[in-house]
């Protein structure tokens, strides 16, 4: 058994201070020798006026060196006793439920609620040290974004890709969110920490959620996102969400959410989570010992005995206080200062590095002006919804370095900007450079299919117009024949009141047909050749970045959207809110 098997230091780096103390001791000895040598050159009577005489009895200097060295050993955390304990671990698992309804675009929290949610979810993920984590998102329906996994980096990529506009079904169905999330739990008795980020729960859903939660062993945390005063819902295209009653104002029902949390035995937190709040959310103390299982390995802890080495130094310090040397002792044993949060190294970060840190927090808006790299500038414009600017920057980059990925991303930007012809050309360029580019081929096929559907609709519309013109021509010819058969004099003497009634009837028919035509043609078609449903579908399919799990997520939601189209129409027909 060696020395280090019986003696342990928890902070061995402090031991180097002993050499510093010895150096000071030697330096002091040399200085004392120098003073003694002065008697060889200066008269003793004169020297007593030049050198301060020591009054009273003093302890030998080597005692101070020994005691200070013992103190340093104590600070280093010396231990010679082991404490062996059995370890019990909790099979922890966490489910993050994110509200992705359109109200997450509300701007009562700058820049919007969605950005705040992504920032705080990243903070929570960064503080989860163990266990599996699952991620679900919901709007009008709920979807499993990632099942239980320990790969938090993938979860963060999916988190950046989440956006209410890509959800297959608009609305806010919190009950369905809990059904989908709790279905991930294989054992209902297994402890699960559920963290819900939301800005509203309908009172009609309270009872359903209660009955679901009662069947599981969970700890529920509700994070309310937004303010009580609320704010307008600004969509990615810059338009404000409105109904026929006016502008939609999304308010956070803080009182109702607090009351609901108390009824469930849950905890409610505002969205500006403090570190102490995150610690409380993730604190999963066991209420039932059965929830813990014995670990395969044992915990071996060394018992710190350093405090015993500090006691002799304290008594010596009290004695030296009279001699006025306490200040120098404190400087000698001053612990190394902790590193500050605001490191001077941040001054040396490039603008791209500073912008990247903001992107990691989901803050693309403040990151965009900082980027100097043209590729990142294009990516930030794309993330902010400035698709035309992103396409232009990608075009400039493509001229300098012609690559399939640049052409592909340019096609995505052009498609989302509504320029389908140019997008098709960009995808074809990407395939010419890389024929095996699967994503580019899929997007090209989709746009060609969409273009064919538009052409077919236009042909059907032209055919309907031709049929209507033929009917009008036949009606006009019949009217002309009847007019030819009538007596011109009788026609001239026709009652003017009847003519007025006929004109009024025609005007009334025209007014009645006008709203019908407006219902058939959505307002969005005035500014875009795509219907509103196709534009939403296009956003879901096209907004993807190569080699990013977000692309997989958006394609997955696109396929789900294909199955949910009918339900989406039913929801809108039923008059249910889509936010």
Image (cartoon, grey):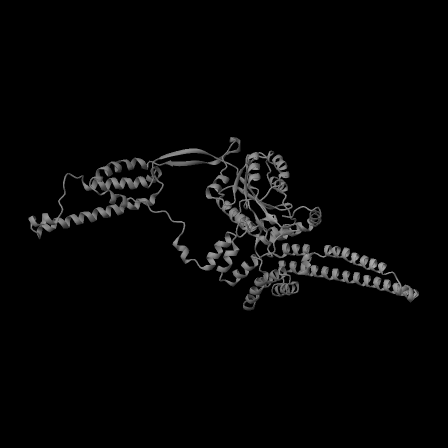
Q: Nearer the viewer, residue 286 or 574?
A: 574
Location of residue 353 in the rendering, given as x and y in whole percent from the top left corner: 46, 57
Q: Is residue 236 left or right of residue 343?
A: right
Location of residue 414 in the rendering, given as x and y in whole percent from the top left corner: 62, 62
Q: Can the viewer see residue 7 in this picture?
A: no
Q: Is residue 558 above or below residue 434?
A: above
Q: Is residue 300 above or below residue 457?
A: above
Q: How many marks?
A: 0
Q: Can the viewer see residue 258 in this picture?
A: yes
| Quadrant in the rendering for residue 497 | bottom right
Q: What's the residue at 28%, 35% (across, down)?
A: 311
Location of residue 391 in the rendering, given as x and y in whole percent from the top left corner: 58, 63
Q: Nearer the viewer, residue 337 or 495?
A: 495
Quadrant containing the N terminus is top left
Looking at the image, which residue sits at the far top?
Answer: 289
Q: What's the residue at 87%, 60% (across, down)?
A: 495
Q: Is residue 306 left or right of residue 415?
A: left
Q: Is residue 192 above or below residue 528?
A: above
Location of residue 411 in the rendering, given as x and y in whole percent from the top left corner: 61, 62
Q: Nearer the viewer, residue 478 or 317?
A: 478
Q: Is residue 239 left or right of residue 116?
A: right
């Amino acid at each position: 058994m060696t020395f280090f098997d019986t003696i342990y230091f928890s902070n061995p780096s402090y031991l180097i201070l002993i050499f510093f103390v010895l150096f000071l001791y030697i330096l002091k000895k040399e200085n004392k020798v120098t003073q003694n040598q002065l008697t060889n050159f200066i008269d003793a009577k004169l020297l007593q006026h030049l050198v301060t005489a020591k009054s009273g009895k003093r302890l030998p200097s080597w005692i101070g060196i020994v005691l200070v060295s013992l103190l340093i050993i104590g600070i280093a955390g010396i231990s010679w006793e082991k404490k062996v304990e059995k370890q019990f671990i909790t099979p922890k698992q966490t489910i993050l439920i994110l509200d992705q309804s359109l109200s997450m675009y509300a701007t009562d929290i700058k820049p919007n609620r969605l950005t705040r949610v992504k920032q705080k979810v990243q903070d929570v993920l960064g503080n989860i040290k163990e266990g599996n984590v699952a991620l679900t998102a919901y709007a009008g329906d709920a979807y499993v974004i990632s099942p239980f996994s320990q790969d938090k980096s993938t979860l963060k990529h999916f988190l950046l890709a989440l956006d209410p506009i890509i959800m297959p079904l608009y609305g806010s169905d919190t009950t369905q969110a809990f059904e989908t999330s709790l279905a991930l739990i294989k054992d209902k008795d297994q402890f699960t920490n559920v963290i819900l980020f939301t800005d509203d729960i309908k009172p009609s859903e309270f009872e359903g959620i209660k009955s679901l939660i009662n069947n599981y062993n969970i700890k529920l945390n509700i994070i309310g996102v937004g303010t009580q005063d609320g704010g307008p819902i600004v969509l990615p295209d810059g338009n404000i969400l409105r109904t026929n009653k006016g502008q939609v104002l999304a308010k956070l029902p803080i009182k109702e959410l607090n009351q609901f949390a108390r009824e469930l035995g849950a905890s409610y937190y505002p969205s500006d989570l403090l570190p102490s709040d995150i610690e409380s959310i993730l604190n999963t103390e066991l209420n039932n010992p059965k929830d813990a299982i014995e670990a395969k390995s044992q915990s071996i802890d060394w018992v710190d005995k350093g405090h015993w080495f500090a006691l002799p130094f304290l008594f010596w310090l009290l004695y030296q206080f009279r001699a006025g040397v306490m200040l120098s002792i404190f400087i000698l044993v001053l612990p190394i200062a902790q590193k500050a949060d605001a490191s001077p190294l941040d001054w040396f970060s490039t603008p791209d590095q500073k912008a990247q840190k903001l992107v990691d927090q989901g803050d693309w808006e403040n990151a965009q002006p900082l980027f100097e790299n043209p590729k990142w500038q294009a990516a930030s414009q794309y993330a902010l919804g400035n698709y035309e600017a992103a396409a232009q920057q990608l075009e400039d980059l493509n001229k300098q370095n012609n690559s399939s990925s640049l052409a592909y991303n340019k096609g995505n930007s052009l498609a989302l900007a509504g320029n389908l012809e140019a997008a098709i050309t960009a995808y074809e360029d990407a395939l010419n450079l890389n024929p095996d580019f699967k994503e580019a081929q899929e997007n090209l096929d989709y746009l060609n299919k969409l273009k064919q559907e538009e052409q077919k609709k236009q042909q059907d519309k032209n055919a309907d117009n031709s049929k209507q013109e033929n009917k009008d021509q036949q009606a006009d010819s019949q009217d002309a024949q009847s007019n030819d058969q009538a007596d011109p004099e009788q026609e001239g003497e026709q009652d003017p009141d009847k003519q007025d009634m006929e004109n009024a009837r025609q005007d009334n028919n025209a007014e009645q047909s006008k709203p019908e035509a407006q219902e058939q043609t959505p307002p969005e078609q005035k500014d875009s050749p795509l219907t509103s449903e196709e534009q939403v579908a296009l956003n879901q399919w096209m907004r993807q970045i190569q080699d990013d799990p977000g692309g997989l997520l958006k394609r997955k939601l696109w396929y789900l959207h294909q199955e949910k189209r009918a339900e989406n129409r039913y929801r809108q027909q039923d008059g249910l809110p889509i936010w």
